[in-house]
Amino acid sequence: MTKNYLFTTLLFALLLAILPACGDDNDPATDNSPASDESATADDMLVDETPDIDTAEPLPEYPTETPTSNQVDDIAANITFFDHEDVMWTLGHFYKKKKLIWLIFSAYNCPYCNVEKADLPDVYKKEYIDGGLEIIFIENGLLSGPQPSKEPEKLKNMRDAMIDGYGDKAKFVYGYLEMDMQSTLAKYVMAGYPTNALIDATSMKILNYFEGWDSSLADNQERAIQFWLDEL
């Protein structure tokens, strides 16, 4: 690991310590309480943003999960979510199909989430996509809780608006959670939104994790993406 990367990592850690986040422990509107746990297997998935994933192939056996998914070296929980066309996905669809996953949990009415959402197209560059990066952006309704019946249309409208504004750079994966999938979310989210996990898709280990967002972090996150795409 180079001295420059060590310096960047230390700077990144310092910035994370002062990051603003929505729905922290003082925010009564946050609802991250677990619901009933239910696992699901997705046989179909949208291949618009990930055409190199062959959905006809059987999924590899997912690694044994750790109790949490919010620490470095945790195994990311195999969360199940639905896309803007209401098609079911799992994180396991990307296991060994990609090299690096940036998993984000967000909320529509979180101002810091909206800042991050606007910053993502500048980081989702073709060279990183070709190198094996995938961004999976999960909108989990409002800070007061998800609204499952409204999510597919809301998510589609948001995705369309992003693509209208940013073009192909906004064609990452968009998803939402149904109510019976909220328990898995509790493994990831500790205090508030947005929640960010950079995941090694070859092992599903978490490489870095933080909550909150500020535009000053975009450059550091891009450097981390560059580093890990080279290392993995």
Image: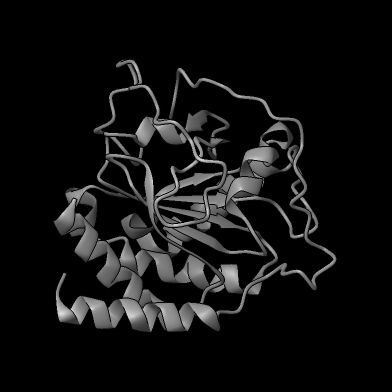
Q: Nearer the viewer, residue 16 or 166?
A: 16
Query: In this rendering, would 89 be left or right of 172?
Result: right
Visible residue check, residue 215? no
Residue 182, given in percent of the width and then of the height, sits at: 69, 40
Residue 115, given in percent of the width and then of the height, sits at: 53, 74
Query: What is the quadrant of residue 147 in the picture?
Result: top right
Residue found farthest to the right? 28
Query: In this rendering, would 173 be left or right of 57?
Result: right
At 63% from the left edge and 73% from the top edge, which residue is drawn? Answer: 21
Visible residue check, residue 43? yes
How many badges with numbers are in the image? 0
Residue 232, given in percent of the width and then of the height, sits at: 19, 50
At 25% from the left edge and 45% from the top edge, which residue is drawn? Answer: 99
Query: In this rendering, would 31 be left or right of 101?
Result: right
Residue 127, given in percent of the width and then of the height, sits at: 17, 58
Above or below residue 74? Residue 15 is below
